[in-house]
Amino acid sequence: MTSVPVTLSFYGASGTVTGSKYLLTVGERRILIDAGMFQGEKRWRDENWADFPVDPSTVTDLLLTHAHTDHVGYLPALVKKGFRGPVHATKGTIRLAEIVLRDGGKIQENQAKDHAEGGFSKHNPPLPLYTLEDVEQTLPLFREVGWDTDVDLGDGIVARWTRTAHILGSASIHVTAPGTDIVFSGDLGRHDHPILKPRAVPEPADHIVMECTYGDREHPEPDLPHTDFVDAINRTIDRGGQVVVPAFAIDRTETILKFLTDAYRAGRIPDVPVFVDGPMALAALDVYEDTSLDELADGITVADFKGMPRIRETRTGQESRRINEFRGPAVIISSSGMAEGGRVLHHLTRLLPDPRNTVVLTGYQAEGTRGRALEDGARTVKINGRHIKVKAEIVRDHEFSVHGDASDLIDWLRDLGREPECVHLVHGDPQVAPVFAKRIEDELGFTVVVARHGEVIRIDQAEPVTIEEGEEPLICGEPERPGE
């Protein structure tokens, strides 16, 4: 038994795949791992507006695994509510998070304005979750960390970041605290990311907080990659239509561009105009081109994802609107990846009602998003208060995901080299996480639990004791109190 109690609280990505937030409490220290925004179903999106479970001003440190919105997007809201501690992250994550947060602040402000002008919000007036000013208050808090280097956080707490090959800058974080240690997997990449250096293995730990987004499936690995996407482009060109690709601005845009370049060079698709529509995606592309980050896989250069002859970068809103005037076949890559916001919405509004056109979904589509509705065959989708008919062809390309599949996840867990006291599964749909939990038990024999939203556990002893919110943590083996 240690004199310093250590607890872990699950305030996001538990019972759902978004909103990553885990609070590690070590004595008087409160360390938040990730500050993600909830996306998808309304009941989860509403959590973004709820009071944070602890006073944000009492959170002493924040550690980031990577720069996707569901891991960093809530950070300005925390700052707005009083958080002022250091935010530790890799250089790549800091560069990309700056882009993500500024874009998020702009989207928040614009959506509030559009909802007010359109009259389709139940709030009067509709307000942004945070503003661009809140973002500017956030950015000076970032502190750069190196790869596989101990960062002393004080009070006997040490953190170390290790590559996960999910997106540029993405990491698992190993935290050593008095009486225990814990690894937060972050989002784990596949064994063969198309453009990034391969993932590495962190030091083993007593407790593992592990994502399981694709814990119930295996990614296809065909001899000829992305055949569905290639066929969709060629069909759409033949009928004079356009292909719109809702794409995450970070990493997905780059991997799609590399695929298009490879397909063109191999003669699988013709020379077709490719619009990369969005300042966020283009700013992220600039970061990927920064050779000082040294994160691209050996042999990969900028030419590998900028090789289409008629690639067009549209940075301004006016340039984006001018795409509507283009009448020939084209491929339009625009965020967001789940079609929940951004410029892709005005492209979908224009293209969905026409059967000549095609929408290609290239990433995970969370429950409750427009992308999931399209994937599930919706006849209409609601965009900016209007119901839009869906007559365009919808194609799902499952090969783009840079989330590890079930075998990738098992391999990562096995490679840690030591059986943990417990594996805590997060970032899994309710029907997925139990499937992966059983696979861990069957193949590795590890103790595994599926984390519950709001759950608090004590981890500074051999066996964790589950505590409900508001209860005092019991030390494992402690006698019952009188009267209990």
Image (tube, rainbow, N blue to C red):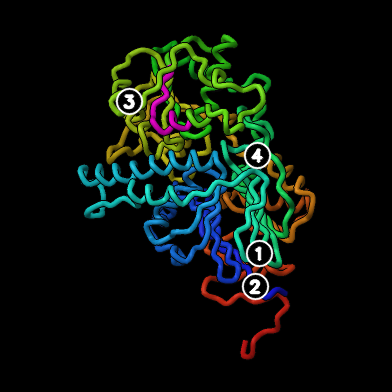
Depth check, front residue: 255 or 198? 198
Question: Helix, strand, or loop for circle 4?
Answer: loop
Kindly report the distance in space between the C-alpha atoms of the residues bearing marks 4 and 3. 35 Å
Q: Count the marks.
A: 4
Residue shown at 66% from the left, 64% from the top: 156
**Within the magenta stretch, is there residue 237?**
no
Give the mark nearest the N terminus, 3 or 1.
1
Give the mark nearest the N terminus, 4 or 2.
2
| Mark 2 or 1, closer to the camera | 1
Residue 357: x and y in percent read 40, 21
Depth check, front residue: 328 or 292? 292
Residue shown at 44% from the left, 64% from the top: 57
**Amino acid residing under circle 3:** Ser
**Amino acid residing under circle 2:** Val
478 over 400 or under it: above or below? below
| Mark 4 or 1, closer to the camera | 1
Q: Which residue is mark 4?
A: 405
Residue 101: x and y in percent read 41, 44
Quadrant where the N terminus lies? bottom right
Kindly report the distance in space between the C-alpha atoms of the residues bearing marks 4 and 2. 37 Å
**Residue 320: which disc?**
3
Q: Which residue is mark 1?
A: 156
**Amino acid residing under circle 4:** Asp
222 over 85 or under it: above or below? above
Kindly report the distance in space between the C-alpha atoms of the residues bearing marks 3 and 1. 51 Å
41 over 263 or under it: above or below? below
Give the mark nearest the N terminus, 4 or 1.
1
Q: Which residue is mark 2?
A: 4
Question: Helix, strand, or loop for circle 3?
Answer: helix
